[in-house]
Image: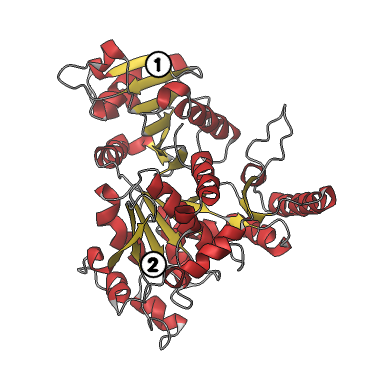
């Protein structure tokens, strides 16, 4: 019996055991896994997920070894409403995320929630979990399966991160550079993009000259080869004589000087950067970091459009950076998410906000002022129907009022390295440790 027929044969209001028994095996098989490649009630180390799956190798059968799962599926009954935003959906998503981040889940790269009426696919890249499709109606289940299989069978190697805040002076460029350097030192392959043609700060920080039309061709000519826009930055460690490399796409020297915003939008399509990066995202890099402009115009919008997730620095002593981070989540990113849905994607999701340049001598009164400001940001968002608490206080739970926010501490080494045109994480151990710890908190498994 085909999967469409299985769904049509399910009784109205099918309970979770019925969906689990009649629908799930056929669903997993349609995704391309055999009966000996799926394990029910797989022990994640944080509770059993309904199903885990992984393709067998010649001498390693998943049903026997139960090692290195690749896909998790969490199943619900028809009484669980999995339309996005419903409390049932949010609970199910929280449950799936807990399993995906559990001790036995390092190898898992995909997760699905379904109740046979709806299904949604999630990607796990290190610690980062993000939706790659909307929660889809399963009325035409074969189209859903085709979409899921296409994505799973061509799993991209890279996570694309836009670094953005609609407020200047919060350290977007510094974060991009030093996060790239730390990830490089940790053995990751990294590409960074100077996507602020008005200022070109990223290239300036590395003492690299602006490109001469390569970025414009990359964005406007669908036949252009993105590799023509890529330059390699090399750092040679003075003591060990070792060399470390990451790649960079530089802004053009005069890309926007003679073109107004209306003409830019005619020339540069909304999906231009996303399209251009597709060939290198698949196999060449582990991380692609986009240094986005401060404003909310074409280049910042394109940077966010091309991203899987958005990393937002703010400052404890800059009210507008906190307010603008909240506004970006409630007002700006939904615009891009709506556009991405038109091509069947879920669109970028924001990561928790972090505080950049946190000084060692912040007084309790200053901290209280910042927290009071965040309370107002949360209240403003709540009036718009958004709960921003997970973005400001990701460790907050009902039982534990944890107001901890991720921080990168102020370091004089960063300013010193700027004069040297070198990422501080490359040449100062204390800077590397800061950004290594930050990378581990946000991105890296273990």
N-terminal label among 2 and 1: 1
Helix, strand or loop status at disc 1: strand
Please indicate, yes or no, whether residue 347 appears anywhere in the rendered image: no
Relative to 136, say whether 55 is above or below: above
Location of residue 48 in the rendering, given as x and y in whole percent from the top left corner:
46, 16
Location of residue 59 in the rendering, given as x and y in whole percent from the top left corner:
17, 16
From the viewer's perspective, is 406 left or right of 80?
A: right
Location of residue 97 in the rendering, given as x and y in whole percent from the top left corner:
50, 31
Gap in angstroms between the C-alphas marked 2 and 1: 42 Å
Please, which residue is most extreme toward the front here? 239
Helix, strand or loop status at disc 2: loop
Considering the image in quadrants, where does the N terminus appear? top left
Location of residue 208 in the rendering, given as x and y in whole percent from the top left corner:
37, 72
Q: How is the image coloured?
A: secondary structure
Question: Which residue, given by chain and number where applicable, does mark 1 sit on?
Answer: 42
From the viewer's perspective, is 333 left or right of 50?
A: right
In front of the other: 369 or 131: 369
Question: Which residue, given by chain and number where applicable, does mark 2 sit on?
Answer: 270
Name the front one of labels 2 and 1. 1
């Amino acid at each position: 019996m085909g999967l469409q027929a299985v769904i049509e044969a399910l009784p109205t209001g099918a309970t979770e055991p019925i969906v689990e028994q009649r629908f799930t095996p056929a669903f997993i098989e349609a995704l391309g896994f055999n009966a000996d490649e799926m394990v029910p009630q797989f022990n994640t180390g944080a509770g059993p997920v309904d199903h885990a799956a992984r393709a067998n190798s010649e001498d390693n059968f998943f049903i026997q070894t139960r090692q290195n799962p690749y896909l998790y599926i969490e199943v619900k009954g028809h009484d669980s409403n999995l339309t996005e935003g419903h409390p049932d959906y949010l609970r199910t998503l929280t449950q799936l995320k807990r399993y995906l981040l559990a001790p036995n889940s390092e190898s898992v790269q995909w997760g699905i929630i379904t109740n046979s009426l709806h299904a949604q696919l999630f990607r796990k890249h290190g610690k980062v979990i993000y939706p790659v499709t909307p929660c889809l109606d399963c009325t035409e289940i074969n189209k859903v399966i085709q979409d899921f299989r296409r994505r799973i069978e061509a799993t991209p190697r890279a996570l694309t991160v836009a670094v953005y805040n609609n407020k200047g002076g919060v350290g977007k460029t510094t974060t991009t550079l030093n996060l790239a350097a730390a990830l490089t030192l940790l053995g990751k392959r990294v590409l960074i993009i100077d996507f602020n043609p008005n200022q070109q700060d990223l290239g300036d920080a590395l003492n690299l000259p602006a490109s001469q039309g390569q970025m414009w061709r990359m964005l406007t000519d669908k036949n252009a080869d993105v590799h023509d826009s890529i330059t390699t930055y090399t750092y040679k460690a003075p003591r060990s004589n070792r060399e470390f490399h990451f790649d960079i796409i530089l802004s053009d020297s005069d890309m926007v000087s003679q073109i107004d915003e209306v003409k830019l939008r005619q020339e540069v399509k909304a999906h231009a950067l996303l399209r251009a990066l597709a060939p290198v995202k698949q196999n060449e890099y582990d991380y692609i970091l986009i240094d986005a402009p401060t404003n909310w115009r074409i280049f910042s919008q394109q940077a966010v459009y091309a991203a899987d997730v958005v990393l937002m620095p703010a400052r404890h002593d800059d009210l507008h950076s906190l307010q603008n981070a909240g506004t970006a989540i409630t007002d700006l990113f939904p615009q891009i998410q709506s556009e991405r849905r038109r091509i069947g994607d879920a669109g970028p999701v924001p990561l928790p906000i972090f505080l950049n340049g946190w000084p060692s001598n912040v007084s309790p009164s200053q901290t209280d002022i910042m927290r009071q400001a965040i309370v107002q940001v949360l209240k403003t968002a709540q009036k718009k129907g958004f709960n921003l608490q997970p973005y400001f206080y990701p460790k907050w739970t009902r039982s534990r009022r944890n107001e901890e926010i991720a921080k990168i501490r102020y370091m004089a080494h960063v300013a010193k390295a700027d004069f040297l045109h070198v990422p501080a994480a490359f040449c100062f151990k204390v800077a590397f440790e800061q950004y290594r710890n930050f990378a581990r908190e946000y991105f890296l498994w273990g």
